[in-house]
Amino acid sequence: QIQLVESGGGLVQAGGSLTPSCAAFGSIHHIAAMGWYRQTPGKQRELVATITNGHSTNYADSVRGRSSVSRDNATNMVVLQVNDLNNEEAAVYYCGVRYSTGVDASDDYWGQGTQVTVSS
């Protein structure tokens, strides 16, 4: 079992930066990747950025070039930074973890989500 504790989020001015962080606790030894996703009402949850154990990163096209994701393997924390935030990026941001359960098998775990509001 994995527990995820998120912090950050809240009210961000348009053009400002968002820097939520997430810590993983529990059976952390088989975490394959950590990352951030976001969801708005009526839409599917979408990728923002992920980072693997080997620190390979993947970004959504919409944030590439103005965001970064970092991970501390020792503390099992993942930190996202998105700069130049716009109104359309107001959403609930979720920390997600991919947990390896075997060869070509994994489970996904999610944090409780943190609301991000963008003010004009």
Image (cartoon, grey):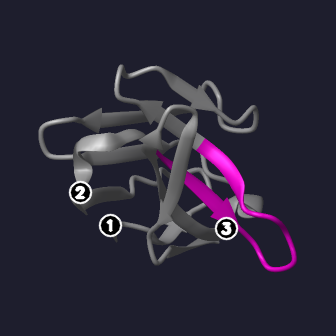
Q: Quadrant of the C terminus?
A: bottom right
Query: Disc 3 and disc 1: Cα gap in Å?
Result: 30 Å
> What label does residue 1 carry, if any?
1
Above/below status of 98 relative to 51: below
Query: Disc 3 and disc 2: Cα gap in Å?
Result: 32 Å
What is the magenta segment's predominant secondary structure?
strand
Q: Find out whether the residues at labels 2 and 1 contact each other: C-beta distance under 8 Å.
A: yes
Label 3 crowd bin: few (<14), some (14–19), many (20+), radius 10 Å: many
Which residue is depicted at the point 70% across and 36% down? 60
Q: Position of residue 45 (x, y in %)?
A: 73, 62
Label 1 crowd bin: few (<14), some (14–19), many (20+), radius 10 Å: few
- Work out whether residue 94 can be spotted: yes
Above/below status of 79 relative to 103: below
Task: Give, as a three-letter code, the residue at label 3.
Answer: Ala
Q: Secondary structure at mark 1?
A: loop
- In the picture as drawn, the residue positioned furthest to the right comes out as 42
Sequence-wise, which precedes: disc 3 or disc 1?
Answer: 1
Q: Secondary structure at mark 3?
A: loop
> What label does residue 90 carry, if any?
3
Query: Does 117 lie within the magenta span?
Result: no
Query: Disc 2 and disc 1: Cα gap in Å?
Result: 6 Å
Sequence-wise, which precedes: disc 3 or disc 2?
Answer: 2
Query: Where are the magenta residues, as a range?
Result: 34-48
Which residue is depicted at the point 85% across and 69% down? 43
Eye-nearest disc, 3 or 1: 1
> What label does residue 27 carry, if any?
2
Q: Position of residue 62 (x, y in %)?
A: 75, 38
Sequence-wise, which precedes: disc 2 or disc 1?
Answer: 1
Q: Position of residue 7 (x, y in %)?
A: 32, 68
